[in-house]
Structures are given as structure tokens and as C-alpha cells.
Image (spheres, rainbow, N blue to C red):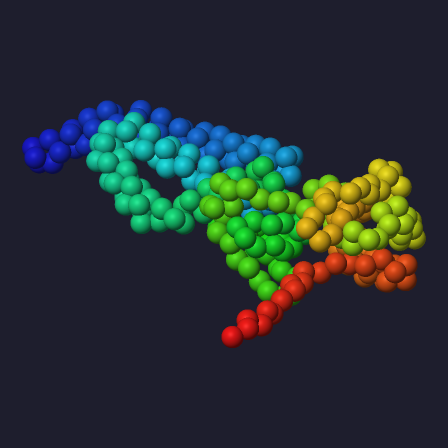
Amino acid sequence: MDNIDKHLEQITAMAIEFSPKIILAVLTLIVGLWLIKMVGKGVQRTMATRDVDVSLQTFVTSLCTMTLKALLILSIAGMVGIEVTSFIAIFGAAGLAVGMALSGTLQNFAGGVMLMLFKPYKVGDFVEVQGYAGTVKAIQIFNTILKTGDNKTIIIPNAPISTSSMINYSTEATRRVDLNFGIGYNDDIDQAKAVLLSIIEKDERVFTDPAPFIAVSELADSSVNFVVRIWVNAGDYWGVHFAMLENVKKGFDENKISIPYPQQDVHMHQVSQ
């Protein structure tokens, strides 16, 4: 009986000693989980207000709440007297090992986050990046997917995209079409300019403001070169580009204006014996 009474006294003493800590730990857990939930909603609401991609909203919110919950559990363990230093060391070593093993993947993830936050392009934009040109079909956490004009799918990791130069052809509503044409030295410059201007004015897709620009750009070895600059809607760029090339050739032919092309004369001399 004495041993039983002694054990009961020890249990009672431990209960009295640890009861406040346990109660405080339970209250901390309840309040902490409520606060974490509120923080998660606040983070998601802020990103939604800034029109951040939905997939990134979900990932970042989950990452924040999981990190806060892990810190909450460690704090509660310390409150009830559990040594957490060893756990922190284990988590740190595991995180370092995983980070080293997935360094490339993590770089792509970081690049994806940057692209989704700063939005240098969006789905539907026509871009040129990493040597590829195409329409953006999807912006994922690790990759960006392009669809080329000949219907090829290009998957590009986000890390190099976020740290290199790119061209977004869809950012502006208008684009300038730059063309170069050459005529022979025996042709009339003013007539050639008039033909070019007439062709431009017949295309309703070409803007009158800014006005078309036509000028002699170079007196080359075998031709007088013109530069033509006209403004169009971004969606009309290639249509106007190709139409101008065809119509200028036809217009020059109709007006007997030559278009020089590289040629080489070979002179043979007979050496007398």
C-alpha cells in the first residue's frame, strides 16, 4: 500500500506541475490554428486582389500555413518541456539535403514564382524567349509552354526565362513594319517612292498616323536601297508584311522599275601560245 500511495502522490504532483503547461499548450494550439487560418485567408485574398495565378495562390497559401503550423508545433513542444533542438537540427539537415538534390527544380520553381508575380507575359501572348518564338499556352510552376506557328509544343524551364531577356510582341497594341527595297541606279528614285506610297495607301490596315516613312537608306554596290516604315495593329503585322513584299514586286514590275540581284560577270581571256 505504501508503494501505491507513493506512486499516487508522484502522479498527483506531476499532474499539478504539468496541468498549467498542458492547458496553456492546448489554448496556444487552438488560438494558433485560428490565427494561421486567418493569415492563410489574408495571403490568398491579397494575391487574388493582385490577380496572381490561381495555382500560385494555392501553393503559396499552403506553404505559408504549413510553415506556420510546423513552428506552432515546435513552440508547443517547447512549452510542455520537450527538447526541440534536435528536431530543428534534423529538419535543417533534411532541408539542406533536399535543397541540394533538387537545386535545378527549385530554381525553376523560383523562376515560376517570379514570372507569375511580375507577369512579363500572360497566356495568349506571342513571345520570343530562349531562342524560341510562339504563343504562350500555359505558365506552370516549373515550366512555360509555348505553341509555335507550325503547331509544335515547346516546354521551357522557368529558371532561364526569369533571368534572361525576352521579347513580348503582344504587350503593345500596335507594331511597326520595317521593310527594305532596292532599285537599280538607272531607275527614277521619285517614281519608286511614289509607287511605294501608292501601294501603302491602298492597304487599309496601314495607319495614316503615324504617317508612313519612305527614304533612301543606302547607296549600295549595285542598288539604291529604300527603307519603308509603316504602323499597323499588332494582329495585322505579318499580313501587311507579306502583302507589301508581293505588292511592291508587282508594282515595280508594272512601272518598269528594276530590282537588282547579285550577279557576277566572268571574263575569259585566251592566252596566245
| Residue 202 in the figure: left or right of residue 93 | right
| Residue 81 in the figure: left or right of residue 203 | left
Evaluate whether residue 235 shows in this view.
no
Query: Which residue appears farthest toward the bottom when viewing the image?
Result: 273
- At a point 55% along the width and 59% down the height, the residue shown is 154
- At a point 51% along the width and 42% down the height, the residue shown is 164
Residue 83 is drawn in which quadrant? top left
- At a point 57% along the width and 32% down the height, the residue shown is 42
**Viewer-closest of 214 and 154:** 214
Q: Where in the figure is residue 140, as x and y percent of width and height?
A: 54, 51
Q: Where in the figure is residue 26, as x and y percent of width and height?
A: 38, 32
Evaluate whether residue 128 shows in this view.
yes
Residue 99 is drawn in which quadrant? top left
Seen in the picture, residue 263 relative to 61 is either above or below; the reply is below
- At a point 82% along the width and 43% down the height, the residue shown is 214
Q: Where in the figure is residue 46, as x and y percent of width and height?
A: 60, 33
